[in-house]
Image (cartoon, coloured by chain):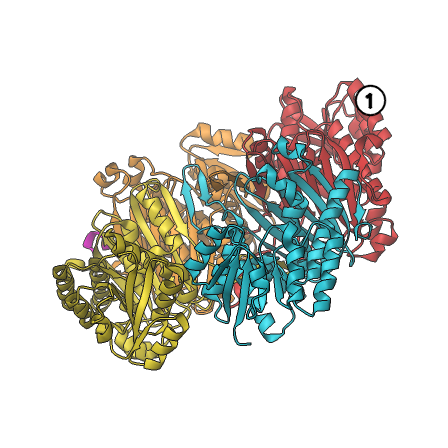
Chain colours: A orange, B yellow, C red, D cyan
Amino acid sequence: MNTLKLGIIGAGRIGRVHAASISQRIEQAEVMAIADPDIDEAEKLTRKLGIPIASKDPTDIFNHAEIDAVVICSPTDTHTEYIRACAVQKKHIFCEKPIDLDLDKIRNILEVVKDAGIQMMVGFNRRFDPNFAKIKALVSSGTIGDPQILKITSRDPGPPPPQYILSSGGLFLDMAIHDFDMARFIVQDEVVEVYSKGAVMIDEEIGRMGDIDTAITTLQFKNGAMGVIDNSRKAVYGYDQRLEIFGSGGMAKIDNNLPENHELFDGSGSHRSLPLNFFMERYTESYYLEMVEFVEAILTGKPLSVSGIDGLLSVAIGLAAKKSVLERRPVLIDEIL
Amino acid sequence: MNTLKLGIIGAGRIGRVHAASISQRIEQAEVMAIADPDIDEAEKLTRKLGIPIASKDPTDIFNHAEIDAVVICSPTDTHTEYIRACAVQKKHIFCEKPIDLDLDKIRNILEVVKDAGIQMMVGFNRRFDPNFAKIKALVSSGTIGDPQILKITSRDPGPPPPQYILSSGGLFLDMAIHDFDMARFIVQDEVVEVYSKGAVMIDEEIGRMGDIDTAITTLQFKNGAMGVIDNSRKAVYGYDQRLEIFGSGGMAKIDNNLPENHELFDGSGSHRSLPLNFFMERYTESYYLEMVEFVEAILTGKPLSVSGIDGLLSVAIGLAAKKSVLERRPVLIDEIL
Amino acid sequence: MNTLKLGIIGAGRIGRVHAASISQRIEQAEVMAIADPDIDEAEKLTRKLGIPIASKDPTDIFNHAEIDAVVICSPTDTHTEYIRACAVQKKHIFCEKPIDLDLDKIRNILEVVKDAGIQMMVGFNRRFDPNFAKIKALVSSGTIGDPQILKITSRDPGPPPPQYILSSGGLFLDMAIHDFDMARFIVQDEVVEVYSKGAVMIDEEIGRMGDIDTAITTLQFKNGAMGVIDNSRKAVYGYDQRLEIFGSGGMAKIDNNLPENHELFDGSGSHRSLPLNFFMERYTESYYLEMVEFVEAILTGKPLSVSGIDGLLSVAIGLAAKKSVLERRPVLIDEIL
Amino acid sequence: MNTLKLGIIGAGRIGRVHAASISQRIEQAEVMAIADPDIDEAEKLTRKLGIPIASKDPTDIFNHAEIDAVVICSPTDTHTEYIRACAVQKKHIFCEKPIDLDLDKIRNILEVVKDAGIQMMVGFNRRFDPNFAKIKALVSSGTIGDPQILKITSRDPGPPPPQYILSSGGLFLDMAIHDFDMARFIVQDEVVEVYSKGAVMIDEEIGRMGDIDTAITTLQFKNGAMGVIDNSRKAVYGYDQRLEIFGSGGMAKIDNNLPENHELFDGSGSHRSLPLNFFMERYTESYYLEMVEFVEAILTGKPLSVSGIDGLLSVAIGLAAKKSVLERRPVLIDEIL
């Protein structure tokens, strides 16, 4: 295999990002087909990027003999079905997170993938962001010593529309799930206990839908390290994505990315720009870099750095967090898994 | 009263700081006497600062007719006795924190102070630090809107000697107590629930003495705001004192103070100095400014901004945190008070 | 014209950058041909990007009926000849800086371009960098008031090979020329006088070739503003590109871009990464954005923001700087033009 | 000599600063007398600080048998007279800068001081500021290698009253003189040539008095290093005091000091406070630290780090700068000295 041939399911926001990355920036890969129920969207994309096939039906991708791998960017509730279809056809899989909101369904589908002998990567793109990757490298190299305290700040510029929350699984499963994965990625150990405080501070409609919009989550890792994540659905100053890791040998932290780094001084003080807003601007490069790894790993047989198990465990932490808020007590991951 | 005449009990580290501030930098105040069981220390200090009386016995201060107010810098277990003696002689009181480690004793002594009609200020000096004071002002002015998430990082450069821990009440009562007071000061509301995770990561000797050296504490405020404090007894990069407050209108934060602000660029990157180390360097100005307020308030009859109740509640939060670690569950302040 | 059809002369470093930008990221443009004496390089590039024609001879581009515009990325001494050929064929021009090292040749060729009724843009890419563009916007909006003092720091990570200096025109014409253009761009006024101090501090070989490797240049603008530029061929900490503009209403400045924004704290202080190194990494986005403007302006008839006159004046300032070092006195631009 | 006994001439702003530092913060020194033509000011100060003698006449200080050293804080045009009187009485001298505006008078008085065998320190307090002192240490230790480019930004928050300029010697002698001394201090070498551009941009009244309010000065050092200083009488954002030194081994720089280090994030960006304003706030510590050195050096016989020659050379550079603006050409220091 010299060139990896891919099909993409879903021509929405994230599907378009992956389609463009692969078509324009990754020489060893080629997008053969895009499927989306909205055929107009699919065709618009294939036309723009010179991709051969647009289809309403993902079956056209599963059955396409030349396609080696499938990028699943469809709604969460279709993921396991499409993964299964890929497994049948022995096509490798890149699946956006979360795999599913149900742990049993995730466990089952991971078995299917394993039995099929195919590779599957879950789209935890932030692991590929240069800021977070640098922190991970500092931990791996032992520069900060044994990790003791992890702190993540993760705040969105504004809440999603109410209907999104109904299907997304709520703050812990659509938003904090990235932070749960990041916590495991940075500490390089497993979470064993979760305690979350949640509140509705931004929009009472969110509360009426049974979700929260603000949370502080304390994590206990197996190796003894502890972590804390604070989440908010609305930071008026924009998308706030920071992390700090404190250890026996030092501390490392990262700050937000700005569109440019000017500083203005006037009679009232000094001023800088708002952070990049929103994830499409902030994490642009990481979406590309995760796809580079996926393509290279499939072509060379190298192991993927993000596995289906990572997809499973981030959901488990999210479910533990929900349970913790509900029952107002720390919850063991073992109660959930 | 044109000049406030003071006596100081305790010629140790903090007693010396207050003696120098009052003698040298506060025109409207005068130190008349210093008492310390170690008479040599007391005399060294009175000689250096031109203070009339050095004594082994604080009674000489309580009984001194001209002394208007007493600054209590002796060990914690002497505080309530000395406060009582001041009350009898109708002398105003500045008392170092904590007032005591026992809530009943604190409550009783606050009654005594109240009945005596004297003023008492507790030494939460950090409230007077220019960084923290600025954050408080931004909250008070409504600049950050309604407070939603408070974050405090408070890490010492190294653990105290083991014997100190035995009498100090441990991490939550000798160290985090400052952070508990700061949390109430910034959010301007009362803590109703505490959840703490504690661990021994730095020195097993600390564990053997029944204390912890690392902690993450989640606070629930009455008004709905939430807070998180992380503490460590040992940051290899020095004294780490940061705070962030996030609200509906914005976010404000403060960073560590450095001895100077140079930045060096060489072949390996850019480099800055370690933070000021330790509290005597970091909080120098705040020790002076709290005394300025105390002197001015007593002279003019203005109310003090830090009260005995503040001293009581910070201890209550500390005891709740200890109980939370022990019982592995969130603890209501009402269970403690 | 719906799509702009372009030919590129030169398959070297900068030619490859423009070829990729246009082919992959600019939908309204298409590269039809690439010419380079090294046909292998040209073919490698056309193959990679799916460009129809590779040629050893730029004439194939000038004579190609469908090509609307030419991007000239060949050595400086070929620029005027190729511009002339474009003018004959009425093809619009994007020319890398400098147009030439001889003012008369530049003046003549600008006449030719004008008479041909074609558009020409000179490649001062830094104007399109988000940092510098933000500063320009702050000046244009009047935020900093009337500009009074401009400061530019421009230091390379290492000197070029000696033979490059021989043909490049030296520090003022191959390196500082970008800063001279930036000075005019930010102050939005013309330089009338130049005083430069130059020295050989890094490599004596550079001195033997008649050039300098370190310089401080003071600029006098027509409107009264003053500027200072410091240049060095070798900053051990990498590519240093900063600017500050001070005016009656305030000051604005920009700093270097880093590969990521981590900060590491250990026992010796805090540490950050080196700046992006070198211009290909630092100014990536600006190369793309200047081409976006070029394509859009040609397609729509909008005026270009960088003109041939900009190319002329930056060389004039460079020549004045050289004369100033030689004669150890301030030199008027009118002495040069 | 166990305690240094001092007299202070001048009870103005800077006299009061030194009086307080010595009386309150320096144990080994004692102020015996303060002289000021405005006897009310002198008495106010002696009363406040418990100093024995207030006088209208500095002769009372010169003739006082117990006084070891004199701190001269009177107007510049009285300095040489008072230095002479000190020399006669063999009293050591701390003299505020500038010694005088006339080089011959300075040279003569330095001879007198030398012949008298007394010590004299000139008040270049900024050398003792922790920021600048750190940079000096980095240069001395070789950390930045051989100094190549020095950059100083020195801008005042607002112009002085016009009458001050008439007697002060103008921008180069009352303001930039600090920067000229700093340049010599950091580079640790002598200035041999000066080129200054000056302009009136802030207040035309300043121009009518024959002075300028904005300047850029290029310095050539004997060892080959170059420097540039930009001065403005009015920065709307306050007192701007920065420095950068670039060398063969790296670069180091310092930034302004702020009253506190908060950062506020709201819907328009992030915001910090204005710098400390003005020199009394910014350089508080340095005024104390220079006096510590003076007292200790006189008591122990250690050499002073700032000499009369430093006072002479800073004036010489200032006069060269004035001449350079007038004659629009670089001026050698040898033309002045």
Viewer-nearest residue: C75 or A84: C75
Disc 1 marks a residue whose amino acid type is Val
Viewer-nearest residue: B9 or D21: D21
Residue D101 in sight here: yes
Name the residue carrying label 1: C112
Letter of the chain that mark 1 sits on in the rendering: C
Q: Residues within 10 Å of mark 1 (few under 14, many from 20)?
A: some
In this rendering, the answer to whether B68 lies above or below C225 is below
Q: Position of residue B232 (x, y in %)?
A: 37, 67
In this rendering, the answer to whether C217 lies above or below D92 is above
Q: Position of residue B274 (x, y in %)?
A: 50, 63
Name the quadrant containing residue B308: bottom left
Viewer-nearest residue: B77 or A271: B77
Count of labels shown? 1
Element under label 1? helix
Residue B175 in sight here: no
Q: Position of residue A290 (x, y in %)?
A: 50, 50
Residue at 49%, 52% in the rendered image: D39
Residue at 35%, 60% in the rendered image: A227
Residue segment shown in magenta: A324-329
Q: Is residue B325 magenta?
A: no
Residue at 49%, 56% in the rendered image: A304
Principal SS element in the magenta part?
helix
